[in-house]
Amino acid sequence: MTVNDIKNAKIKSWIEECVKMCEPDQVVVCDGSAAEYDRLVKVCVDAGLATPLAKKPHSYLFRSDPSDVARVEKRTFIASKKQEDAGPTNNWIDPVELKATMKGLYKGCMHGRTMYVIPFCMGPLGSPIAKYGIELTDSEYVVLNMDIMTRAGEKVWPYLDDNFVPCLHSVGKPLENGAKDNGVWACAPVEKKYISQFPEEHLVWSFGSGYGGNALLGKKCFALRIASVIAREEGWLAEHMLILKLTNPKGEVKYVTGAFPSACGKTNLAMLIPTIPGWKVETVGDDIAWMKFGKDGRLYAINPEAGFFGVAPGTSAQSNKNALEAASKNTIFTNCALTEDGDVWWEGIGYPAKGKLVDWKGNVRDALPKDKSPKGEEFAHPNARFTAPAKQCPCIASDWESPEGVPISAILFGGRRPSTVPLVHQSRNWNHGVFLGSIVGSEITAASTIDASQVGKIRRDPFAILPFCGYNMGDYFQHWIDVGNAAKDKDLLPKIFYVNWFRKDDNNAELPGGFMWPGYGDNSRVLEWIFDRCDGKDNFIDTPIGYMPKEGAINTDGLADYYKKTLPEILKVDVEGWKKEVKDIRENHYPKFGKHLPKELMSILDDLEKRLNAAN
Ligand code: GTP
Ligand code: SPV
Ligand code: MN
């Protein structure tokens, strides 16, 4: 099929316009077939950009440019007509100005390259919640990743209409006069990178980066930034959330979503293997959830993606066996280290490597006798990733592609908080839950190149969607309140919880990594409490910050003694810590939103402060 065969006039003329601007050597309409995938893999291998892995069937390792290893938040823009509509937490450029700048960059940017046309669907094909887009890209790596991450290719055409989301992407490195990439990852210098969303037009323009969320435009650009705008227009929720299916020993099922910032444990929680007997966790999604009310008045969620773009470092047989299994074949690895026998390796994989390794920068170095490396000398980049088909995950839920979605009982918020925030607490009601989402904070991770010196510092990341919200965050809070008000029956709304697996005590040498809670599979102990809370079980106490587990309500059978000792500490309300939290929210966080801050949230903050004062 060629562009000429495209029946939809709007789609055809948009592509023709982009071809005219970008001037690729040729245009290929992707069919999404296995043959096409293998043909493009061969192009990458022949160009020295990908290495086939002897130890993992049909899997390849890519090394990106050291300047192009994560999302670039300072080059990510929400170009709404009015700056106020982008809000205080987004970078804004006037759309007319931004388009003029980017058109200058796009002019002839695909010289020497092929433009690929990727029709794709976010969500199960034909689902009433699914949405459709077309990505134009000059990167074979992007085509391969989109093939795994979305439902892409020929099968999508019957569903495409004028409502598609146009997504234009270029690595921003034209090849003039027959030049070649010579095995070097193509991208543009940082000041020429633009990851741009035009919310009023539901349009994405990305230039200069080939990595992850900057380039796989179905993911953060469409499924979060643009979808959050569409969701607000249409009355639903597009969220940076995992979706899991939780089954108790009696065989009863509840579905739970969870919003944690980047590299804070969504994939791990979604694939968790419970350490408490009789419980089961299965995966519906690991990064994004789209939630809509069903006819029965409950909120239903779909995973718009078809694959996992997961953080590799820290993934081991111990921490996340299911992710390793999902990525054992048909997988793309990016910025992992390469072993002598043709396998991938990363810090925290659970065993030391042998002999020599090729690190993520392409240097050959002697492996260390342990599975960690000093900061800055990692063999795998801290944001190294695997792209694996979701259907390969051993714990994928049988109904993960249910077109109408799965009914959600609980919503979790969380982040990396070394102090103050307890293991778990529950909101008193929906709006109090919106408050909890609005104050989420976390240590900054390597998933974004904000500024390497910032990694580890706490920043507020409301609803874990700070880098992914396509409009004013104050209006986004209001939208959550409106969704609660729109519920036919408030009792059917999901219950909302705040969890923190990351409390630290660096003075306790017994604790692995200094963490006061084991995390991973042991998080099932908290999920059990949450499950029972959803059933209204009397397993809680009322505290100044919300409902918390009453004594003995968290199952500690089989937990190491040192965690039994730290548990009371992470289950109590740190009144002084929370007072500081309130002060910071009042002085530094909420004022940013000005008149866009819902008054409900301010009164919940006042109420929290009163309760904390009364606790003295
Ligand atoms: P994105 O894909 O960037 O959105 O990340 P994510 O939220 O899916 O995070 P992921 O599950 O990939 O975890 C990121 C890092 O956190 C990994 O190195 C994990 O090993 C670590 N991690 C995940 N869960 C836990 C936990 O319960 N406790 C501790 N201490 N670390 C965890
Ligand atoms: C994240 O940073 O939250 C990710 C990775 O899931 S990326 O797709 O690069 O945004
Ligand atoms: Mn993510």
Image (cartoon, rainbow, N blue to C red):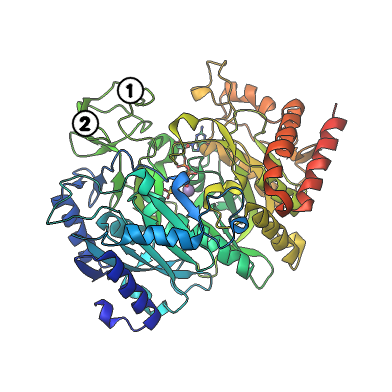
Q: Is residue 225 visible?
A: yes
- Residue for point 78% across, 42% down: 605
- Residue 122 percent across, percent down from the top left: 45, 65
In this picture, residue 536 sits left or right of residue 520? right
Mark 1 Cα shell of 10 Å, populated few (<14), some (14-19), many (≥20):
few
In this picture, residue 9 sits left or right of residue 236? left
Which quadrant of the view contains residue 371? top left
Numbered label attached to residue 370: 1
In this picture, residue 73 sits left or right of residue 82? left
- Residue 261 percent across, percent down from the top left: 54, 43
| Placement of the N terminus among the 4 image quadrants | bottom left
Q: Nearer the viewer, mark 2 or mark 1?
A: 2
Question: At label 1, which amino acid type do we have?
Answer: Lys
- Residue 543 percent across, percent down from the top left: 80, 36
321 vs 581, nearest the viewer: 581
| Placement of the C terminus among the 4 image quadrants | top right
Mark 2 Cα shell of 10 Å, populated few (<14), some (14-19), many (≥20):
few
Q: Is residue 286 visible?
A: no
Q: Up-down: is 316 above or below 182?
A: above
Label 2, label 1: how far apart the Cα atoms are:
19 Å
Assign a secondary structure to mark 2: loop
- Residue 12 percent across, percent down from the top left: 34, 78
462 vs 82, nearest the viewer: 82
Tell me whether the residue at label 2 lies in contact with that at label 1, contact meaning CB atoms closer than 8 angstroms: no
Say which label, 2 or 1, has the lower sequence index: 2
351 vs 67, nearest the viewer: 67
Which quadrant of the view contains residue 134? bottom left
In this picture, residue 152 sits left or right of residue 129? left
Residue highlighted by disc 2: 363
Assign a secondary structure to mark 1: loop
Question: At label 2, which amino acid type do we have?
Answer: Asn
- Residue for point 54% across, 58% down: 289
